[in-house]
Image (cartoon, rainbow, N blue to C red):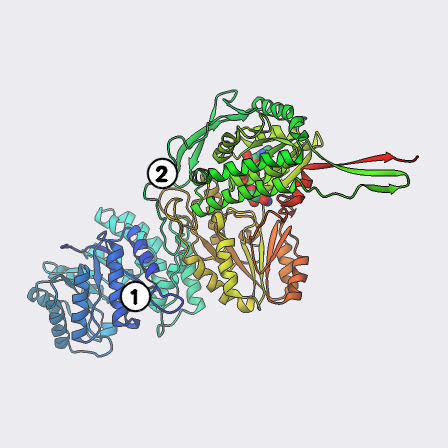
Amino acid sequence: MTVQLRGVLTALATPFAADGSVDVARLRAVVDRSIDGGVHGVVACGSTGEFTALSGDERRLVVETVVDQAARRVPVIAQTGATSTAEAVALSRHAQSVGADVIMPVAPYYEPLSVEETLTYLRTVAGSVDIGVMIYNLPVATGVDLDPDTVGALAREVDNIRYIKNTTIDMAQSAALIHNHGDVLSTFVGWDTLLLPALVEGAAGVMAGTANVVPAELVAVYDAVQAGDLEEARRVWARVHPLLDAIMNEPFIAAVKAGMAAVGFPIGVPRAPVAELDPDAVARITKFAKELQVSAPSTAATTNGTVRRAASGRLLAQGDLPPGQHFIGGAFRPGRFGTAIDVVDPSSATTIAQVAEGTVEDTDLAVAAAKAAQAGWGRLTPKERSEVLHKVADRVAENADLLARLESANTGKPTAVAQDDVAQTVDTFRFMAGALRAPTSAAAGKYAEDHLSVILREPLGVIGVVTPWNYPLLMAAWKMAPILAAGNTLVIKPSEQTPLTTLKFAELVADILPAGVVNVVTGYGPVVGSRLAEHPDIAMIALTGSVRSGRAVAQAAAASLKRVHLELGGKAPVVIFEDADLAAAATALRAAGYWNSGQECGAACRVLVHESVADEFTKALVDEVSSMVVGEPGAGDDVEIGPLTSKAHFDRVTGYLERAAAEGVRAAVGGGALPGDGYFVAPTVLVDVPDGAECAREEIFGPVITVETFTEEDEAVNRANAVPYGLSASVWTNDARRSHDVASRLDAGTVWVNAHLVLANEVPWGGFKGSGYGRDLSIYALDDYSRTKHVMHNVAR
Ligand code: NAD
């Protein structure tokens, strides 16, 4: 295409992978970030792009990648010089052949040419291609300062020389180019801090390395000047200038990369021989970046910076949705008042269904139905109840695909997570169907003289169940399966945000379970949940949810002294000792910290790593997280991170990230929301976390891991325990004695050694302290949902 360059052109930085090679995936993300920021062109292999450190093949690879990724959205300029004339010609022809729009052959850096030799070099290279050519005046590196008239004459002589990038701080020189040679040359300044003065002077634009850092701000300055709104241009300029200045005052390549990290878009450090910045310089750049508030959620991004969207956009077909009504006494019924709650797809923020807004009266009807059904259900023999539960498991398995799609549509879960939820749901019913036939208890026997003791396990009666939105179907199954196995009936209130799979489950098993055994009332916690907690005919209230809701139901339950079963929040510490397998830990945390987008009460979210291995571990973790795929469910089986489940929760998580940034905590990767529709937050690793920081203390419940360091084992244990939660934890060490000892000292209901978030139906799940009490899964859940009765017979004769 014939292009006319103008505006803000990004001199793209080049990212390198851990093995030192050009990181093509991240380079694509760097291109996207600039284009998403509104720039008008991108430059491959400029000096910001470290072409001096790239081989000829790598330079070709970078140009090909940038052209491919830009995909004609903006023009691509390829820097093809700084080599022998023959190589510059070869690079230029290659750039033209793969689709670059303009070449920019800088004179060789390290072998100073005379002005005449430089002109010959430029003439030859320009003559080798048909596309436009930009002269790159960079005296600081080439040793030749091309004066405006010389350049003007060259442009008049050589047809395709149309642009100049003038990288000097001599504004008068740029002004001479603009005013005296504007008929043949468009002038771009190459000194980022001259952007506004140059534009006011009439320059075509700027070619800026800092456009990798703050593309949108530089574009805003350009746009304002174009619109004639100099006041607005000055306002934005005043905000962004201190950061540009801080970057321009440091070794430029490393400073641009430090700036990118400071705004939540880290792409690593320069390749040798370019040195990294010293920490003071990084701190200065970070400070100005923070002041500019570029770490704010709307601008931060993951390493690939984008959300992969599903091709078709629709997960559900006609007839997949359950009725949006309560399920009471074996049938769907409308709510008493006829009001409804919207159910939203968090990938697109669109309403996909409505369900009834339950009332106290609806709840009471459901409790009455459960009460009426309980005696019959409780009287079944273990074998009979077991067979029913096996049939339920079969029915769920037969509808696994439908349930997984419904769950993904309602929660945004990646397909793999939703499918796992359904598979675990099946296994939970199967386990309980088996376990209920092998009750455990003290043996009947004569424990007092002439008296025979018999210990009975009895159902509690009707149980009220309240579930959260993070695993709607699975958390319902964790409650329903043992509750039913133990001979109880139930009324369940799913989260008002995610009721679809619970209703679908009821619809699917309606012909298997006797009427009234399972009842579903949809609605809000303070109405339906609260009524269940206080209802006199409910024997126990079982809730999985936040500490706040746990406290509310425990208080409501107190009046009737009913039992309370609470699975609440968590803030799992991950204690990594110096002898641990760090690579294995980083790989495990990729799953354990970010499964279900981190909306997981057992998530490995708070790393405490020994200071001697902290850098090595953090780098390994950041590498893992940097390659995570963020996308909509349905955008591929490799999607690992979906959106957060609701706008309210999205606001909550991004609020934590904003406050962390304000506290001086740094995002080594991620750091905020991702652009586009839906509630997507970039997978994030927070470092430089001071002891006691909010982000390391409170449950964020999003794709965020914090990394803190420790020096002594006791300190690690004390800090791990110094939060109100006690749900789960992990210890990473190859020292067997230490692993036993530290595991025993961690105050958590589950402690993994050299693993995290591995669950099984045979073993209990539940917390200590603020994480609640009561156990899900295993025979301990069966115990929790039944009562022990001692019958003593006087057998004296
Ligand atoms: P939430 O407490 O906001 O809601 C959970 C349920 O409680 C919802 O159905 C809600 O409607 C209901 N509820 C709210 N107020 C209530 C009240 N006053 N009385 C009765 N019910 C009320 O929690 P959430 O945001 O849906 O879920 C996230 C929380 O759940 C996190 O804290 C997470 O750690 C926790 N969680 C814990 C486990 C576990 O096994 N320990 C598992 C999953 C989630």
Alpha carbon separation for disc pair 1 and 2: 42 Å
Mark 2 residue element: loop
Does residue 685 appear anywhere in the picture? yes
Q: In which quadrant will I find the N terminus?
A: bottom left
What amino acid type should be assigned to the residue bearing mark 1?
A: Thr
What amino acid type should be assigned to the residue bearing mark 2?
A: Arg
Q: Is residue 774 above or below residue 56?
A: above
Q: Quadrant of residue 218?
A: bottom left
The one nearer the camera, 425 or 212, is 425
Q: Position of residue 776 (x, y in %)?
A: 62, 43
Disc 2 residue: CB within 8 Å of ligand 1: no
Q: Which residue is mark 2?
A: 314
Q: Quadrant of residue 143?
A: bottom left
Q: Is residue 342 above or below residue 181?
A: above
Does residue 568 appear anywhere in the picture? no
Q: Position of residue 432 (x, y in %)?
A: 61, 41
Q: Quadrant of ligand 1?
A: top right
Disc 1 residue: CB within 8 Å of ligand 1: no
- Asked whether, in this view, residue 336 is left or right of residue 202, the answer is right
Q: Is residue 75 above or below residue 353?
A: below
Q: Residue furthest left?
A: 157
Q: Which residue is mark 1?
A: 48
Q: Label 2: few (<14), some or many (≥20) within 10 Å?
A: few
Q: Which of pointers 1 and 2 lies earlier in the amino acid sequence?
A: 1
Which residue is depicted at the point 24% across and 75% down?
Answer: 109
Closest to the camera, between mark 1 and mark 2, is 2
Q: Are marks 1 and 2 in contact (CB under 8 Å)?
A: no
